Amino acid sequence: MSINCFRTAKVPLQSFVAVRTNSRPRNSSNRLVSVFGSKSSPSFVTLKVVSSMAYEKELDAAKKAASLAARLCQKVQKALLQSDVQSKSDKSPVTVADYGSQAVVSLVLEKELSSEPFSLVAEEDSGDLRKDGSKDTLERITKLVNDTLATEESFGGSTLSTDDLLRAIDCGTSEGGPNGRHWVLDPIDGTKGFLRGDQYAVALGLLEEGKVVLGVLACPNLPLASIAGNNKNNKSSSDEIGCLFFATIGSGTYMQLLDSKSSPVKVQVSSVENPEEASFFESFEGAHSLHDLSSSIANKLGVKAPPVRIDSQAKYGALSRGDGAIYLRFPHKGYREKIWDHVAGAIVVTEAGGIVTDAAGKPLDFSKGKYLDLDTGIIVANEKLMPLLLKAVRDSIAEQEKASAL
């Protein structure tokens, strides 16, 4: 099987005009995307789509890629063996599913979009799999990928070799940046949740000239029904598990069952205006977010519900359908956010009517390569809660800084 990474081609680009305003635009062709905080009052920035561009082909490919990758992950999680768990150079856990998922997504996108430019920014590379002693793991991953792709007629019975697999994984070594088109993938977002049997997501997004234009979240363990018990968008029974969220710029966010051909349902973020009635999400792992700071912010807002702590960008999916109203992420000092941890989730939430910013109220900038340069952390809320949230964040951070200086 021929694998050709980093193809280049000229493609039509979507044009945007940034419009700054102090109120929500009345023109439905304008879309609220971010808030800039200030000490007085926040102002909204909208992007007006000047010329529309369809992403149907890319979306179909992304949904197929993420769904197939999720199928591989489900198989591994169901029969997880200790030998499946490796250790990367940064000591974070990684399973055969991470590598297999990345290979599947790479191969599907390359095949489905063979005439398109192909650049993939992804979390994994094949370095550890090329080391001595990794032969059995490599062969197991190759078999998993071949078995997964065999369920798709479009692959016509093609069989990958271990070298093919390594090349497919390394298609994800693009650096991204402000120019051109780049797919962005976290093959298993929430690996620790995956290892515990909890929440994880296959998160795939598309950047065009540094802007997010498409996102897909495959969340195999997320119930179709609300995990907060207050989701009016979803009336399905709680025994249905596995959600696929997807969004393209200007077209809204949709959700459907992951393992079926069920019709997608358009979703929206919570419309809660009173922070006392809001609930908030944060990372399950204390190492991924400062829970004490989140608690201080929640107290200032008057939030009464306890935090909902789950792994991965499944939080973004749950927020997009109104399960909760706020997401707070404040990593420990020195941690640098990677774009694959937020690209897909950010557009899923914003297209559902939410706002995603850093702690200063500035929009997330995905145009600078693999990392996000942020002010302190990431916050998510609806338009009406965001000004209150920004103030609570500023006040809580100031208090912490003052206390640490004593």
Image: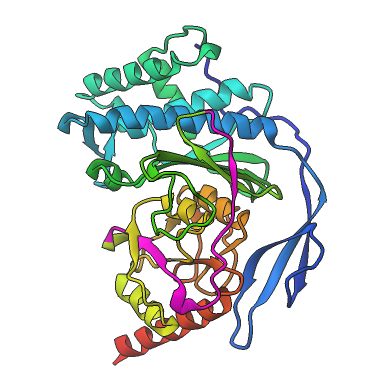
Q: Which residue is at a point 49% across and 11% down the rendered structure image?
A: 1
Query: Nearest the camera: 11 or 158?
Result: 158
Provide residue 286's location: percent of width, then percent of height: 27, 63
Provide residue 261's location: percent of width, then percent of height: 54, 28
Q: Which residue is at a point 50% across and 77% down the rendered structure image?
A: 389
Q: How many marks?
A: 0
- Residue furthest left in the image: 82
397 in relation to 168, above or below: below
Q: Which residue is at a point 43% across and 55% down the rendered structure image?
A: 315
173 in relation to 108, above or below: below
Report the coloring of the rendering: rainbow
Provide residue 36's location: percent of width, then percent of height: 62, 74
The quadrant of the picture occupied by the C terminus is: bottom left
Query: Nearest the camera: 183 or 77?
Result: 77
Visible residue check, residue 186: no
Question: What are the residue bounds of the magenta stretch?
Answer: 261-285
Tell me the chief SS of the magenta region. loop
Would residue 151 be found to the left or right of residue 25 on screen? Answer: left
Q: Which residue is at a point 34% across and 18% down the rendered structure image?
A: 142
Magenta stretch: includes residue 266:
yes
Magenta stretch: includes residue 58:
no
376 in relation to 63, above or below: below
Would residue 266 be found to the left or right of residue 290 on screen? Answer: right
